[in-house]
Amino acid sequence: MTLTAEELYRRGRAQLNAGRNAAARQALLRARTRTEDPNLRARIAGSLAAITIRQGDRASAEAICLEALAWTGLSPATTAMLCGQLGLVALERGDLDKAMSLLDRGIAGIGDEVEHRAPMLLNRSVVHMQAGRLAAAIADLDRAVPDYAATGDEVSRAMAVHNRGYAALLAGDLVPALESMGEARTVLSTASAVNAAICDRDRAEVLRDAGLTRDAEHALERAIRVFGAHRMRQARAEAEFQLARSLLSHDPERAAPIAAAAARRFRAVGSESWSVRAEAVRLRALLTVEADGRATSVTPPSDGAVDRVETQLRAHRLRAEAASLRLTWQRRRAQTGPADPERESRIRVPADAPLPVRLLAQEVRAARAAASGDDARARRIAAAGLDELAGWQASFGSLDLATALVMHGAGLLYAGLGAAVRSGRPEVVFDWSERARHLSQQTVPLRPPPDPALAADLTELRMLRAEAVSGDWLAEPRAAALSEQVREREWSSIGRAGGRRRLTLAELQADLDGDTAFVAYAFQRDGLVAVAVTADDARIVDIPRWPVVRRALEGLRADLDVAATVRSGPMGDVVRRSLDERLDALSEALLAPVLPIVGDRRLALAAAAILNGVPWAMLPAMRGRVFTVTDSATQWREPREPAPFRGVGFAVGPRVPRGPEEAARGASAWPGARVLEGDEATVGAVTELTARVSVLHLAAHGRHADGNPMFSGLELADGALFGYDVDRVTPVPDTVVLSACEVGRSSVRWGWEAIGMTRVWLHAGTGTVIATPVIVADDDACELLGTVHTGLAAGLPPALALARAEERTGLRSSFQVHGRGF
C-alpha cells in the first residue's frame, strides 16, 4: 500500500521524536515528493531542519526554514511552527534573546496544535534554564508534559519530564533531579541509543554535582561514543564539555585538552557561546594545574586570555561561568604569588550563582587572607563557606551521597586546616580536624521505609555477582544499570533526624580519664600533622616523615595479602621481611612522634583518610596497646542511651573451612547464642537475626567494591549481604564482628572521607565494629575471634577484649576495633 504524504510525514515525525534521525529523514524526503501543499511541504521542511540541527549544521537548517517561510499560502500555524524551528537554531547557537523572541512568536501563533506547541514549550524552557529563569522553565515544562500526553507521544513526554529533572539539578535539588531523569530514562532508553545518550549526558551532570565524578565520566564517555557514531557533532561536543567540567575537579591536566577539543567542535558547527564556555573550562583547567603546584609541562594562560574569554562569557550573559573563570584566576594569583593589591580585582559573584561558584569565591577570599598573613580571617571565611555547604548537605541522609558531596568543600577544608596549623594552637587544629571529619557525619539518618522494588533489585544484583566471572562485576551492563537504580532509590528514601554538634577540645579533655588518650591525624596538601590529647595536655605534632609513610603505603596491601597466604618456605620469609620493613617504617613515622605525649595509655585514633588501609594493630608501637579507630572525637564520645541486651548471633557463609568452628567457639561463651550456617545462612535470615541481637558475628568471605563501596559485601548462602542491606536494618547490633577479609577496607573520597563496610555499620547505628582491612588466614581468625567472645561475654569493652585475645593466643593480626571500642 502506498503511503500518502501526510502519513509519511507523521511517520517521519515519530522517528524524529524517537531519535532515529536516518529513518526520519528518509520518511520526510519521501513525503516531500508526494505533495504540493505549501503548508505540508513547509512542515516537512521544518522537520528536516530539526534533523539538520541535530547533526550540527545550523546554517543549513536556518536556510531551510527561511526558504519555507518565503512560500505563499502558509497558514499562521505553519508560520508559527517554522518560527519555533528558527528559535531552536538560535538556541543551539547560544543567541538566547533571538531564541526567546522566535519561540514566543511560535507559541503564540500555534494555537491549540499541541503536537507543535509542546516542543516549542520544551525548547523555550531550555532558554529559560540557560538564562537562569528556573521558575519560568518549570512553568513551560508543566505545560509541555500534558501536551505531549495528549498526542500520545510518550517519548517526547518523557523528554519533558527529563528536562523537569534538569531544572531541579540547576536549582541544586539533586534527588528530585535523579528521580525525574530516572522516570524519563525508562522510556527514552528503549526508544533509541541517541535518547539514552542524552539521558546519560544530563544525568552525568547530577552525578558530577553529587561528587560522583567517576560514575559521571563513565556515562559521558558512553554518550560521546553514541553521538559520534550518529554524527551529532553538537551533542558530542556538549558531552565532551561536561566531561572536561567533571575532570576539572580532580584531573585538570586531562580536562584541558578535552575542553579544547570540545571548543574546536563547537566552532566547527557555529556554536559561538558553547565554544566560549568550553574555552573557559580549558583556561580554568590550566590555572588549576598551576595552582596545585604539580610538576607539569602545562603552560598557564596569560592574563589577557582570561580577560578576553571572561568578556565573551559576559556578552553571552553567562555570568556564573564568567565568575567561575575570574575566581579561578584570582585563586591562582592568591595561592602562587605574594599579595598584589593593585592587581587583585574585586570578587564578584552573581546573586543567583550556584553553590559551587559561591564556595569558590570563599576559597579566593580565604586564600587572599592567608596570603596577607591573616590566618584567623582565612579560617572564618573557610568556615562560613563550609557552613553553607553543610546547609545544603542537611537535606541528604544517605551515607553514599553525604560522603561524595565533600568534593565541594575540599578546597575550603585545606585552606582552613592550613591556617589552623599555622596558628600553632592545639584547640584550633583540633577544631578543624573535627570539622573536616564532621562534614559528612553531621546529620543522623532516619531508617528508610520498606521498599519491595529495592529489595528485588538487590536480589537480582546478588545473582549477578554470584554469576560474575570477572572481579569488576558492577561494570557489566545489567549490573551497572541496577546498581545505579539502587543508589538513586537509596538517595531519595533516606531522610535525616536532627544533627550532631561538634565536640570541642576542652569538652574532650574533660571527658578523658588519666588512662586514655586521643590522637587525630590531619592531612594537608604537603603532608600530615597530628593532634595528641590527654586529660591534661594537648599538642600539635608534626609528622615530618610523610614521604616515608607514602612510600611504605605503596605495595603494603599486596605484602599483607601475600603474607596471609604464603606462610612458610623461602618465599614466606622474603614477604615477611618486606612486610616487617614497611610496618616498622609506618610505626616509626606515624606513632613515634606522638608516643611521648600519649605514653602507654589506651588510645582512640582518628586516622586521616589518606592513611586508609594502615593495619594499625600490626604496627610495632601498637603491640599490647588497647586502642580503637574512630571516625572523629565527636562520634567516639557521642552519648548513647544504653539498650537492653538482646542476645548474640553468629552466621557462617559458604567456603569458610573453619567458620563453623569459629562460630561454635564464640557461641560457647554466650548462653542461648543462635548460629546460622549452611543453607540457613541466607541474606534474609541473617538480616532478621541482625535486628534481633546486640552482638553479631559474621564469618564469611568478603569483597570490597572500590568503585561503589556500598556494594561491598559478605558472601552468604544465597548471595552477598551488601552495604545497602545493612543500611536498611533496624535496630542494628551494638557490636559487630566481621570475620571476613577486605571488608575492613575503605575507599577514599576527595582526600577526606573513607567509606566501606565498617563505616556502613557505624552509620547505621552500630557502636563498635571489629574488622580487618586485608586478607587474614582462616586459622588466625578462628583462634583469635573465637577467643574475643570470652572477653565480650565477661563484659570487657571490645577493644580490651581484642587485646586480651591477642595476648592469650599470641597472634599478631590485622583485626582492629572501629567506633566506640571503649
Image (cartoon, rainbow, N blue to C red):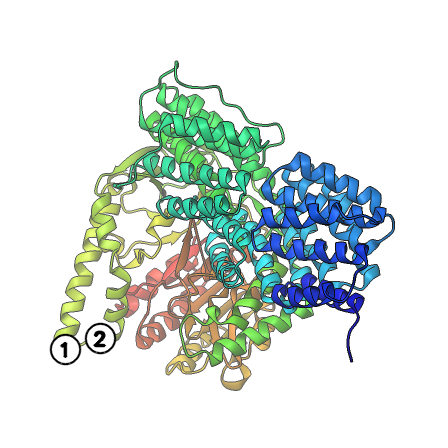
Residue 73 % position (x, y): 84, 49
Residue 97 percent across, percent down from the top left: 67, 34
Observer able to see residue 135? no
- Kindly identify which residue carries mark 1: 569
Outermost residue to the top? 342
Q: Give residue 52's position: percent from left, percent from top.
A: 61, 55
> 456 left or right of 428?
right
Amino acid at pointer 2? Val
On the image, the x and y values in percent for residue 354 come to 58, 36
| Residue ID at (78%, 53%) | 116
Q: Quadrant of residue 633?
A: top left
Left or right: where does residue 769 sit relative to residue 732?
left
Q: Could you tell me the amino acid type at mark 1?
A: Gly
Q: Distance between the Cα atoms at labels 2 and 1?
A: 8 Å
On the image, numbered disc 2 is attached to which residue?
566
| Pointers 2 and 1 in contact (C-beta within 8 Å) | yes
Disc 2, SS: loop
Q: Quadrant of the N terminus?
A: bottom right
The answer to whether residue 630 is above or below residue 666 is: above
Q: Is residue 474 above or below residue 429?
A: below
Q: Secondary structure at mark 1?
A: helix
* Most foreground residue, 781 or 173: 173
Q: Residues within 10 Å of mark 2 (few under 14, many from 20)?
A: some
435 lies above or below 487: above
